[in-house]
Amino acid sequence: MGNVYVELVSSLLLFALVFGMSATVEISHMQKHLHSQTALLIGIAMQFLILPFCGFCVVKIFQLPATVGITLLVITSSPGGTFSNLWCSLFNADLALSVTMTAVSTLLSTIMLPTNLVLYTKITYSAAVIQELDWQALYVSLAVVLGGITGGLITSSWAKSRGRRTAALIHTRANRMGSAAGLVLILVSLTVSSSDHQAALWDQDWTFYCAIAIPPLVGLMLAI
């Protein structure tokens, strides 16, 4: 039952995070970014070609055990967006582009996520490991993200129709809600991760820290 409650709370926080960030974005701004093919193609290539391959290389080079390796492959094969929206908001980056990329990558991930995951997991580990993957949880997360984006954009559109003052108020409150949910979700993730491993997160082998640091650093440098 404990795991069920954790998954429920995590899903609610994830929805609140994506909803809050999306509710601050105007649909017209997203439409402009949809016509910016270069930016979207760079994001798609990074998300579904570069990062999954990078995760696979890290797993092979460091010979990570299945418990850690599979988690890394899932993360690098999954669509970005939940925490990227939060960081874009906190550092005043292009939130509209981030939300647009989240929506596009989440839709594409319904095909690309299982494709990359099965491909690299089959090459790295046994077929039995693939059968143990929790596909239902992965697709529930995708549905939550899409629901949060849809609900947030509808709310943003409604707020705009009520006038500039109402829109500004709702955008501010939605942003605060999304930011708070994101920070709490990080704490929940750290707590669950610490309880799921025999050794604490700060008491792992050096290869663990190198393995989880390489994909985001490579992605960041290539994106820049």
Image (cartoon, rainbow, N blue to C red):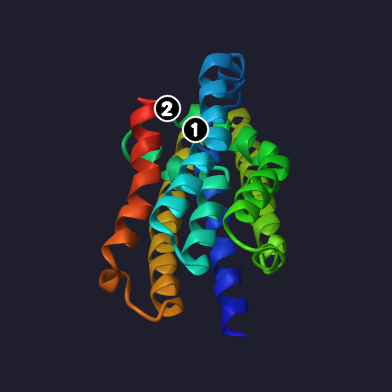
- Name which residue lies at 46% across and 54% down: 59
Quarter that holds the C terminus: top left
Quarter that holds the N terminus: bottom right
Q: Residues within 10 Å of mark 1 (few under 14, many from 20)?
A: many
- Name which residue lies at 50% across and 27% down: 97
Q: Position of residue 102 (x, y in %)?
A: 57, 37
Q: Which image quarter: residue 209?
A: bottom left
* Residue 183 visible somewhere in the drawing: yes
- For this rendering, which residue is in front, 203 or 121? 121
Q: Amino acid at mark 1?
A: Ser
Callout 2–callout 1 Cβ contact below 8 Å? yes
Circle on res. 94: 2
Q: Position of residue 33 (x, y in %)?
A: 56, 19
Q: Which image quarter: residue 158?
A: top right
- For this rendering, which residue is in front, 88 or 135? 135
Mark 1 — residue?
98
For the residue labelled by badge 1, is the local secondary structure a helix, a strand or a loop? helix
- Name which residue lies at 64% across and 44% down: 116
Q: Position of residue 24 (x, y in %)?
A: 50, 36
Q: Amino acid at mark 2?
A: Asp
Circle on res. 154: none
Mark 2–mark 1 distance (CA, rounded to whole Å): 6 Å
For the residue labelled by badge 2, is the local secondary structure a helix, a strand or a loop? loop
- Name which residue lies at 32% across and 70% down: 201
